[in-house]
Amino acid sequence: MPATHQRLYINIDHVATLRQARRADEPDPVAAAQECERAGADGITAHLREDRRHIQDDDVRRLAATVRTVLNLEMALTEEMLGIAVSLQPYQVTFVPERREEITTEGGLDVARDPRALRDGIERLKRAGIRSSLFIAPDTDAVARSREVGADAVELHTGRYAHAPHEARTIDALRNAARQAATAGLAVHAGHGLTVRNVGPVAAVPEIEELNIGHSIVSRAVFVGLEKAVHEMREAMRAAGR
């Protein structure tokens, strides 16, 4: 059984993607965040990419000033992004991998690549009072290394599961990684490619406290509006615990 109240954070990047198609001022991702909060979202997630392909600096400044729940700022581990985070003081920073050629974030962070830089970045966030999370593949080595560098939480990449939800190995990997992370004292989050059709087994993993979901909710909102799209996802998550 999942936690009594598994948190749902809405990623509003794709609202900004639609806006940037015209470089216009609508739809406004900050207004979308407010609508999601009114609909019951527990937090708002936004990824300020180095290439600024969707979320812009002004967006995160306005989000930091107006989000009433909590703001989870996704970003690459760079000096520029750390400076922005320390200045804006979001509740949480999630370090994610970034490649210019990808359409969206594919794969987990390579925690073994430069553990010293990760440790230093996490320590800088801690000094600023900012919680840290690492977006990682659901494997034992990544979980262990996340603990070693001092992260507060891990967000398990659910992409493989989302592409093959009926293959037992994909959900088993998530369950095993979640159990390992929780045992190591890490908070456990998950996200990527989750929809109302496939979220149930992930929401049912007892160690997973928080889901980050964006694209499917924003896509559904085109037809039914953000409020109903958020409610539908929340109901699909709740159904997993019945």
Image: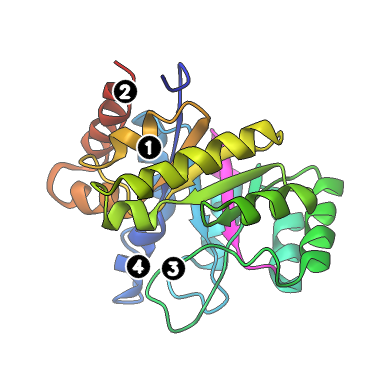
Q: Tell me which amino acid carries mark 2.
A: Arg
The residue where tag 1 is placed is 202
The residue where tag 3 is placed is 106
Residue 208 located left or right of residue 22: right
**Inter-mark Cα distance, 1 to 2:** 11 Å
Secondary structure beneath label 3: loop
**Inter-mark Cα distance, 3 to 1:** 19 Å
Q: Tell me which amino acid carries mark 3.
A: Glu
Pick whichever of labels 4 and 3 is earlier in the sequence: 4
Residue 180 located left or right of residue 102: right
Pick whichever of labels 1 and 4 is earlier in the sequence: 4
Asked if marks 3 and 2 touch (Cβ < 8 Å), the reply is no
**Inter-mark Cα distance, 4 to 3:** 17 Å
Between marks 4 and 3 in the image, the one whose residue lies nearer the viewer? 3
The residue where tag 4 is placed is 17
Give, as a single range, the part of the protein colored magenta. Answer: 65-77
Secondary structure beneath label 4: helix
Q: Position of residue 193 (x, y in %)?
A: 33, 54
Secondary structure beneath label 1: helix
Q: Nearer the viewer, residue 117 or 226?
A: 117
